[in-house]
Amino acid sequence: MLDADPEPHERVYYRNIETGQRAYVVTRAGLEKLRVDHGPNSDIIVALNPIEWTVDKDVRPINTVHLAQVAYEADRALCVRLSLHREAKLEWRDLTDKERARFMKSGPGDSHPARARLFAYIRRALEPYTSKQ
């Protein structure tokens, strides 16, 4: 079999040691490779390098960065309704690393009680599905 992608329940997942990015084993041209797990339309294939990747023993589907991204998008949608248009326009990719780290830790802070509550609810709801990596 030259190319094969396992069914979701058969996948063996790996995590990038440095970035925490998740991938699963596929076969390409008869060799084991990793398909980076960015969604159904993503086809990023990388080498299975044990120095960069390790078997993911915690196979929950999202990591803490993903959780923060979901919470951030919900916060942006709420900001539109609260007429906080400057905050609503700022996308996750536009934040600095320091701003992303701060949001991951404490969400929008005390800027508005509804925003803080939304962040807390999302974090609590998604925590069972979130790996600690």
Image: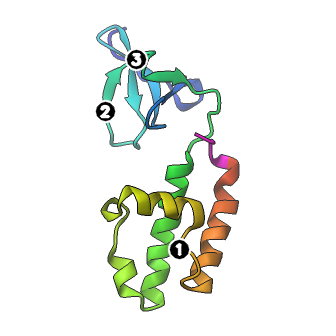
Circles 1 and 2, Cβ within 8 Å, touching? The answer is: no
List x then y, in percent, for residue 25: 45, 21
Whole-angstrom CA distance, mark 1 to mark 2, is 32 Å
- Element at badge 2? loop
Q: Say which of 118 and 31 sits in front.
A: 118
| Residue type, numbered disc 3 | Leu
Find residue 76 and report its horizontal and vertical position in percent. 44, 75
- x and y percentages locating residue 16 in the rendered image: 46, 30
User: Vertical placement of 75 versus 81: above or below?
Assistant: above
Q: Dividing the image into 4 quarters, which one contains the C terminus?
A: top right
Please state, as top left, top right, bottom left or bottom right, where the N terminus lies in the image: top left
Tag 1 residue: 108
Residue 13 is left or right of residue 31, and the answer is right
Q: Amino acid at mark 2?
A: Ile
Badge 1 amino acid: Pro
Marker disc for residue 48? 3
Residue 93, position in %: x, y? 33, 59
Instruction: Identify whether 109 is placed above or below 21.
Output: below
Query: Which residue is drawn at the image coordinates 41% and 20% (left, top)?
Result: 26
